[in-house]
Amino acid sequence: MFSPIFVSNENKKVITKDNIKGLPDLLVEILSPSTSRRDIGIKKKLYARHGVREYWIADPERKTVEVFGLKGREFENKRYGMQDCLSSNVIKSLMIEVKEIFI
């Protein structure tokens, strides 16, 4: 399974004909029992260290999305539930009702 990503126009040089050679601006992971420890622990630290601007973790079991925004070299987070509308600091006009994600 592939994780959704977003690359801004300012960062489009990382997109090549064959793949992405560099960091996307936004990464989304969808938790599964077999990968959740890795996504929440190892990947989150790795993405922050290398400068991914925003990292989302969607948890289908809890029906939440945790949005991690890069501040310096660490992530600050906000958790959104089914009644919330989440926004992105990377994609300024993006507003998503969390319930739409888990339909």
Image: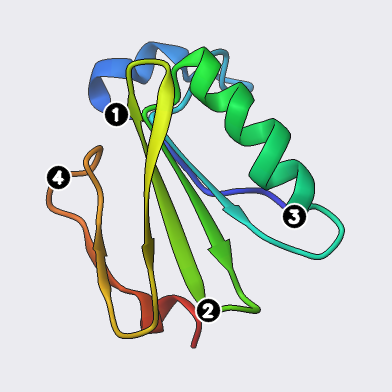
Q: CA separation, marks 2 and 1?
A: 27 Å
Residue 60 image position (x, y, % from top left): 61, 75
- Under circle 4, the secondary element is loop
Mark closer to the observer (3, 4): 3
Q: Which residue is mark 4?
A: 92
87 left or right, relative to 29: left
N-terminal label among 3 and 1: 1
44 left or right, relative to 35: left
Q: Amino acid at mark 2?
A: Lys
Q: CA separation, marks 3 and 2?
A: 14 Å
Structural crowding at the residue carrying mark 1, measured as other residues with C-alpha within 10 Å and reported as few (<14), some (14–19) or many (≥20): few
N-terminal label among 3 and 2: 3
Structural crowding at the residue carrying mark 3, measured as other residues with C-alpha within 10 Å and reported as few (<14), some (14–19) or many (≥20): some
Q: Which residue is mark 3?
A: 36
> Considering depth in this image, is 26 or 14 the residue closer to the camera?
26
Q: In the rendered view of the protein, which quadrant contains the N terminus?
A: bottom right
